[in-house]
């Protein structure tokens, strides 16, 4: 069975660290709970191009990138799913130049041999469109996301898990399973 898994907010707990840097650089005092929308620009008021450049530069900084911690339970869940026969595809809005550090981070946490492919977002495709295209092509039976803005398109095709975050509280769909931990996902998918 094929499973498509997002990276940031799902495997890598990057957002609190991004926010820390944004607060520092722009003299803001935002906390995670302020993020009731997904777009960094919407919440910070910083133009999209500028905030994405800031964000991308952070992810290309090796010491910052490798200091990022995994989402609780994600590493053991990935290993369990792979061992249970799931074919893991990571689908991320990270751009291709971030592939090297993404790979190193996965090595650091021992999951570099547990997936089939990592799909990065080519520079010219805005993030929402990329995920829609990628999920459509992959036709995975399961999707795990923390961003809710495109997943309703796939409710008839895949079982969808949405990790509970401030930025997806607005979203509610009877066919999307909102979960607070990876444990709930593996317990649902792997029958003992
Ligand atoms: Mg995400």
Image (cartoon, rainbow, N blue to C red):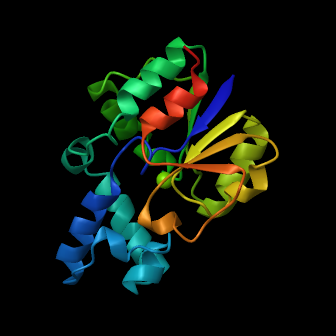
Q: Is residue 2 left or right of residue 162?
A: right
Rendered residue at 34%/59% (across/down): 15
Q: Residue furthest right?
A: 156
Q: Is residue 157 left or right of residue 2?
A: right
Q: Is residue 116 above or below residue 36?
A: above
Please identify the quadrant where the N terminus is shown: top right
Image height of 66 relative to 8, above or below: above
Please state which of residues 83 and 65 is positioned toward the viewer in this rendering: 83
Corner quadrant of residue 113: top left
**Frontmost residue, 162 versus 127:** 162
Relative to 96, is 23 on the left or the right?
left
State the image quarter where residue 132 is shown: bottom right
Relative image position of residue 100 (x, y in whole percent): 38, 36
How many labels sit on residues?
A: 0
Using the rendered image of the protein, determine whether residue 114 is visible from the camera's viewpoint.
no
- Residue sitting at 51 percent across and 27 percent down? 187
Q: Residue at x 44, y 60 (%)?
A: 165
Residue reaching furthest bottom? Answer: 45
With respect to residue 161, does 74 lie above or below? above
Image quadrant for the C terminus? Answer: top right
Residue 93 visible in the snapshot? yes
Q: Residue at x 47, y 76 (%)?
A: 49
Q: Position of residue 92 (x, y in %)?
A: 53, 47
- Coordinates of residue 2 in the picture (x, y in percent): 67, 27
């Amino acid at each position: 069975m094929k499973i498509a898994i997002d990276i940031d907010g799902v495997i890598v707990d990057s957002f609190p660290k991004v926010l820390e840097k944004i607060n520092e650089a722009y003299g803001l005092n935002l906390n995670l709970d302020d993020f009731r929308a997904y777009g960094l620009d919407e919440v910070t008021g910083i133009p999209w191009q500028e905030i994405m450049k800031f964000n991308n530069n952070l992810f290309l900084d090796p010491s910052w990138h490798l200091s990022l911690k995994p989402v609780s339970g994600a590493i053991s869940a990935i290993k369990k799913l792979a061992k249970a026969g799931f074919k893991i595809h990571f689908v991320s809005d990270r751009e291709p130049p971030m592939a090297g550090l993404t790979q190193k981070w996965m090595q650091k946490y021992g999951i570099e041999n547990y997936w089939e492919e990592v799909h990065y977002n080519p520079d010219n495709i805005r993030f929402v469109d990329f995920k829609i295209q990628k999920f459509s092509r992959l036709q995975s039976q399961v999707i795990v996301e923390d961003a809710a803005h495109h997943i309703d398109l796939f409710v008839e095709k895949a079982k969808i898990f949405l990790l509970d975050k401030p930025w997806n509280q607005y979203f509610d769909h009877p066919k999307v399973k909102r979960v607070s931990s990876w444990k709930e996902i593996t317990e649902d998918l792997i029958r003992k």
